[in-house]
Each structure stands twice: as C-alpha cells, then as structure tokens.
C-alpha cells in the first residue's frame, strides 16, 4: 500500500489519529450544500503500541466496515520535505525522489515508503522549476499500522499524514485566490500549514506542545508564545520569498483547549488572526462533546483526515 492509495467507494470516511493518550476515531460524511456531518467521534485510551483489542472495540462501536478507513502517521514516523521535481518520466518519479532523499532523511532510503505531492507553480508567471513535497515514511511504521488493522479485520484504504488532514480543514475556509495559514497544536508539537485553492504550499513543525500552551507559569508560557511568534514570522517571510504570487490573507488558530495564544498572536503579527470554532465548519449534532474547544482540539486531526474526498490529491 502506498501512503496515498486509492480508496474504494463507500459512504463516509472513518479516520483514526494516534497519540500518547490513545486513539481518536472520527466518522465524517460530506454533504453537498451543507456542513460535513460528524457521525461519530470516540476516543480509546491507551499507550502505544495499542493492543488489537482496542481497535476491535472501535470496529464494533462505529461499524468500521461500513466506511472507507484512513489512519494518520505520527510526527516521528515520517518526514515531509520540499524538493525540486526530478526531470524524469512520471513512472520513474518515485524512484528518482527516493534517490534524492537518501542524504536528506534520518533513516536509510531503502527502509522508506515514498510518495509525492505536487506543489502548483504560478500560473501567470514565467516558467520555474516545479517543486513537490516528498513524503518518506518508515517501512516499519507503515507495516505495523497495516498489521494492526489487518488483525482487526478493518480494511485500511489510506495511510495519511497530519499535514494533509490540516489541509482538508483549511480547504473549508479558504478565500478563492488567497492563501490561508493554519496553526494547530497537539501532544507532538505545533503544525503550521499554508494552503491556497485546496493545495498545500507550506508545512512547518513548531517545537511547542499543546500541554506547554497550558503551562501555569506566566513566564514559561510567555517564552512559548515568543517562540511560536518568531517561528511564524520566519515561516511567513520564507513563504513570501518562495511563493510571492500567493497573498496569505489570515492565520487561523485551531482549537487548543487553552486561552491566551490567540490574543498574543493577534497583537504581534501583521496579519489578521482568527480563533477557529470547528462548529462553524462541521455539523456536531450527533457528537455534542465536540462543541467545546477541548474536544475539538483532541479530534482536530482525525476530523481533518475524515474529510478526504475521492480523487483528491494526496
């Protein structure tokens, strides 16, 4: 299975995201002309590696076989790198990318599952080298996840990454022709993405966790806020140089379950900063627990992964 394998056609997606606390599962159904309906959102506590019994319970609780299933790799199980696209025929692209990655990733390229995501260039500008995102996942992480789902008899259609899940949520909020920056935090750190017209253009990790944002010490919390702000400013400066044809209209801060960061960023960044309430994007009528910020923060990536559409890139 590739990281972004083609999925079979069924109604809705079941997505799982793993953390140090356990596994979150969300089922989302897209609807024409209406908010996506969240049909289920459940969390099962446990430490990695989770026993198969945990997913077997999920299988029973949410009727997993009724949906196409996708799961997200954790931050330490893959690397995402932007590179110039090799000038090779399409059928040779992944082989060429693997060769180029051999000195760029922190594990042997022979032990990697590799996939690629195109980065569109400036449609109205002069020709320039085409860029792409290369995803290199550890074979061991991919095979372990496949084995876990196989043991539970859950048909796993896609193995995805958090950057794409966040891109999917950003796609519900974009202004046509403008860039949207989105910032989220979980137990593995912060994730900044910039998207435009449904495409991912920038993805950066920030070494601050959601637990650190809830730090009770004002001094420590201020240091984290300063670090985040500096990383954002550097990232936006880089983006302006790399993709001058896209204007980033605003920064959207995903739910964190803690207060303070939104106001701080709004005071210290040159662009508008918006705090996201996922209830404006999703129908939570069947899962009222997600009406609060803490629940939204916990299920943020699972909800994004479950927004996947048939035929969408990556």
Image: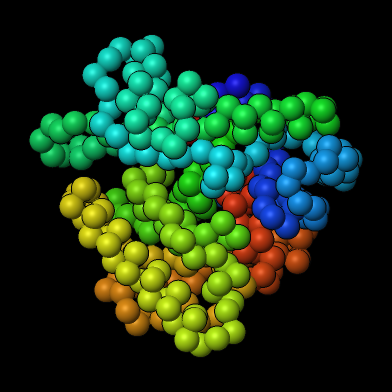
Image position of 88 with respect to 62: above or below: above
Q: On the image, which quarter does residue 223 sit in?
A: bottom left
Which residue is painted at 69% across and 31% down in the image? 144
Residue at the image point whose x is 27% and y is 15% from the top: 88
Q: Position of residue 293 (x, y in %)?
A: 64, 71
Q: Most extreme residue toward the left, as rendered?
A: 126
Of residues 304 and 81, which is closer to you in this image? 81
Q: Nearer the viewer, residue 16 or 122?
A: 16
Q: Residue at x 56, y 40 (%)?
A: 77
The answer to whether 175 is drawn above or below residue 295 in the figure is: above
Colouring style: rainbow
Task: State left or right for residue 50 relative to residue 60.
Answer: left
Residue 173 visible at all? no
- Would you identify the image quadrant in which residue 286 lies? bottom right
Quadrant where the N terminus sits is top right
Residue 236 percent coordinates (x, y)? 28, 60
Q: Quadrant of residue 70?
A: top right
**Residue 45 falls left or right of residue 113:** right
Image location of residue 122, percent across then percent down: 20, 40
| Residue displayed at 69% across by 33% down | 145
Q: Is residue 63 left or right of residue 172?
A: right
Tally the numbered discs. Answer: 0
* Residue 74 seen: yes
Closest to the observer: 270 or 206?
206
In depth, the one of 271 and 230 nearer the eye is: 230
């Amino acid at each position: 299975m590739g990281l972004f394998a083609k999925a079979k056609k069924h109604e809705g997606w079941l997505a799982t995201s793993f953390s140090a606390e356990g596994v979150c599962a969300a089922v989302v159904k897209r609807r024409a002309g209406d908010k996506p309906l969240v049909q289920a959102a459940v969390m099962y506590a446990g430490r990695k590696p989770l026993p198969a019994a945990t997913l077997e319970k999920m299988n029973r609780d949410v009727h997993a076989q009724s949906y196409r299933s996708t799961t997200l790799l954790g931050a330490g199980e893959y690397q995402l790198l932007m590179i110039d696209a090799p000038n090779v025929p399409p059928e040779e692209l992944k082989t060429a990318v693997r060769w180029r990655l051999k000195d760029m990733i922190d594990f042997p390229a022979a032990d990697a599952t590799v996939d690629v995501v195109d980065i569109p260039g400036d449609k109205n500008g002069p020709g320039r080298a085409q860029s792409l995102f290369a995803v290199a996942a550890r074979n061991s992480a991919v095979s372990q996840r496949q084995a876990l789902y196989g043991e539970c008899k859950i048909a796993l259609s896609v193995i995805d990454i958090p950057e794409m899940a966040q891109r999917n949520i950003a796609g519900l909020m974009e202004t046509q022709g403008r860039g949207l920056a989105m910032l989220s935090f979980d137990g593995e750190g912060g994730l900044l993405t910039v998207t435009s017209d449904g495409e991912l253009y920038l993805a950066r990790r920030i070494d601050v966790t959601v637990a650190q944002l809830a730090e009770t010490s004002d001094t420590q919390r201020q240091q984290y806020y300063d670090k985040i702000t500096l990383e954002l400013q550097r990232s936006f400066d880089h983006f302006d140089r790399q993709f001058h044809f896209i204007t980033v209209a605003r920064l959207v801060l995903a739910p964190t379950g803690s207060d303070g960061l939104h106001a701080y960023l709004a005071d210290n960044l040159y662009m508008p900063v918006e705090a996201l309430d996922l209830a404006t994007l999703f129908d939570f009528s069947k899962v009222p627990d997600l009406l609060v910020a803490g629940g939204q923060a916990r299920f943020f990536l699972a909800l994004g992964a479950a927004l996947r559409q048939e035929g969408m890139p990556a």
